[in-house]
């Protein structure tokens, strides 16, 4: 911005005839610099504004979307598919990093499509999905299908040793990873195979992916705000 002002000042001096005649050879160069500097400065401002709209800082997005009163600029951002898309990409990357299991294209496409039209649903609207997911037989078959989709030999499990109690013989125990809904059931997510991903319980699934300040919480906060925009 300082350079832009400097070029503009030079232009004013040139127009007023302040530049001495001995500097005649420099006039074309200064004039060229004025034009280039002005154009570059304006183009730079436009470029920066576009970047802010499409890939906003996640912390700023979280604080803005928590506000009770949405500004006009935020309303515009929430309607921009690139804004929500950027948050979805950040969330999916977080899932991969924390579970240490890569997502396949089918999961990524499903998440972007579903989040693009997602909205918070009432408990009554998700009864069928919750009832189906609570069925142990259904969940067992779902784990097998998810493992196949991800190209895993078997569905992952975690091993831990519970704290001993007096008189008990304690040994290592195993538990299958949780089935994490990429698009939460509370936001229209289903039990479809592409919407599922293994996540260790409880550390990774509940404390990290769903934890306070996680990319998922930022994304859901913005989706709720989008419903008010």
Image (tube, rainbow, N blue to C red):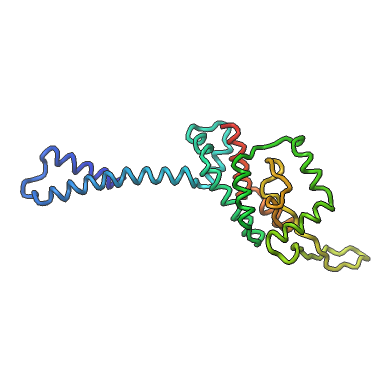
* Residue 165 screen position, x and y as percent: 89, 63
* Residue 34 screen position, x and y as percent: 21, 45
Answer above or below: position of 218 versus 202. above
Residue at x 64%, y 59% (from the top left corner): 98
In the displayed structure, does residue 28 sit left or right of residue 111?
Answer: left
**Viewer-proximal residue, 15 or 115?**
115
Instruction: Give the position of the N terminus as an image quadrant.
Output: top left
Residue at x 55%, y 31% (from the top left corner): 69
Of all residues shown, which one is farthest toward the right?
167
* Residue 39 screen position, x and y as percent: 28, 44
Answer above or below: position of 106 versus 225. below
Q: Is residue 135 visible?
A: yes
In the displayed structure, does residue 128 sit left or right of residue 120?
Answer: right
Residue at x 60%, y 34% (from the top left corner): 227
In the displayed structure, does residue 65 sit left or right of residue 195?
Answer: left
Q: In which quarter of the image is residue 164?
A: bottom right
Q: Can residue 206 be seen in this view?
A: no
Instruction: Give the position of the C terminus as an image quadrant.
Output: top right
In the displayed structure, does residue 166 sit left or right of residue 182?
Answer: right
Q: Quadrant of residue 221?
A: top right
* Residue 105 screen position, x and y as percent: 61, 56
**Viewer-proximal residue, 208 or 77?**
77
Exactly how many numbered labels are in the figure?
0
Of all residues shown, which one is farthest toward the left?
22
């Amino acid at each position: 911005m300082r350079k832009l002002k400097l070029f503009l000042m030079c232009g004013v001096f040139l127009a007023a005839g302040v530049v001495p005649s001995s500097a005649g050879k420099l006039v074309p160069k200064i004039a060229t610099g004025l034009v280039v500097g002005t154009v570059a400065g304006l183009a730079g401002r436009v470029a920066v504004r576009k970047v802010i709209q499409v890939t906003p800082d996640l912390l700023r997005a979280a604080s803005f979307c928590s506000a009770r009163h949405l500004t006009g600029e935020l309303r515009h951002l929430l309607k921009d598919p690139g804004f929500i898309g950027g948050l979805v990409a950040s969330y999916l990357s977080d899932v991969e990093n924390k579970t240490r299991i890569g997502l396949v294209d089918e999961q990524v496409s499903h998440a972007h499509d579903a989040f693009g039209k997602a909205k918070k649903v009432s408990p009554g609207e998700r009864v069928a999905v919750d009832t189906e997911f609570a069925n142990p037989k259904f969940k067992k078959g779902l784990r097998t299908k998810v493992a196949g989709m991800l190209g895993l030999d078997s569905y992952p499990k975690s091993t831990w040793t519970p704290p001993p109690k007096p008189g008990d013989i304690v040994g290592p125990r195993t538990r299958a990873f949780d089935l994490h809904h990429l698009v939460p059931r509370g936001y229209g997510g289903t039990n479809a195979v592409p919407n599922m991903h293994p996540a260790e319980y409880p550390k990774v699934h509940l404390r990290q992916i769903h934890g306070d300040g996680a990319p998922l919480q930022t994304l859901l906060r913005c989706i709720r705000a989008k419903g008010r925009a």
